[in-house]
Amino acid sequence: GSRGCGADVHERGVAYRALGQLDRAYDSLRAWAQAYSASSAAGAAQIGWALWNAASVRSEQGQHAAAREIYDDIEDNWRNSIAEDARARALLYMAITENRIALGAFGEAESYADRAYTTLRRSDGESIDSTKALGLLGDVAAARQDAPRAVARYEEALAMLGRVAPDQTELRDQWQRRMASLSPH
């Protein structure tokens, strides 16, 4: 049926992306989103996931303005179909935060990062995702050249990381490097 066809297109999109064929990946993922929007039963959530993959592809290509438009479409899509407090929305806000940082829209970045962190703390308590959201708040502050605030956020994130996922050394090293680059000496 039509669902199988949509899934094939999506698999192809993911495969192209893995192979670094980003334009082909993007076209497949957009086609998948179109297939879903044509079949109303499949729902906006599925369209959102397809578009999210497409937005990630655009981000990998450095096409942040194009990615921004897609992220805005997903938000519109999910406004009525996925609860405001759902983890999926929070994870989307994290992706949008990175997009806004890349675009230099730091005020928007901070507000998305705040919403992500607040939602994830409510749904997960202390978790790897809420820790990453804290780290993103550090990234926003760093991008704004607000070193004291960035360092405070990274220190909070590192402390939480030690409690929830001490084995995540890559993340720990990344935040420590960013903190080191912010300190004046």
Image (cartoon, grey):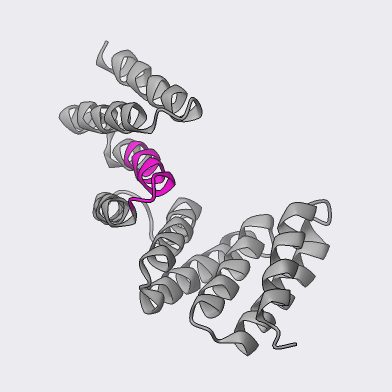
Query: How far from the left and from the top, in percent, is residue 115?
Result: 46, 70
Q: In the rendered view, tell whether residue 157 sits above or below residue 124.
A: below
Q: Quadrant of residue 7?
A: top left
Query: How far from the left and from the top, in percent, is residue 57?
Result: 39, 40
Q: Residue at x 32, y 33 (%)?
A: 26
Question: Which stretch appears magenta?
Answer: 50-63
Query: How far from the left and from the top, in percent, is residue 19?
Result: 49, 25
Please say whether residue 53 is one of the residues in the magenta stretch: yes
Query: How far from the left and from the top, in percent, is residue 33?
Result: 26, 33
Please say whether residue 49 is one of the residues in the magenta stretch: no
Tally the numbered discs: 0
Q: In front here: 34 or 149? A: 149
Q: Residue at x 34, y 39 (%)?
A: 54
Q: Quadrant of residue 28?
A: top left
Q: In the current view of this chain or complex, which residue is farthest to the left? A: 38
Q: Quadrant of the N terminus?
A: top left
Horizontal side, residue 158 vs residue 77: left or right: right
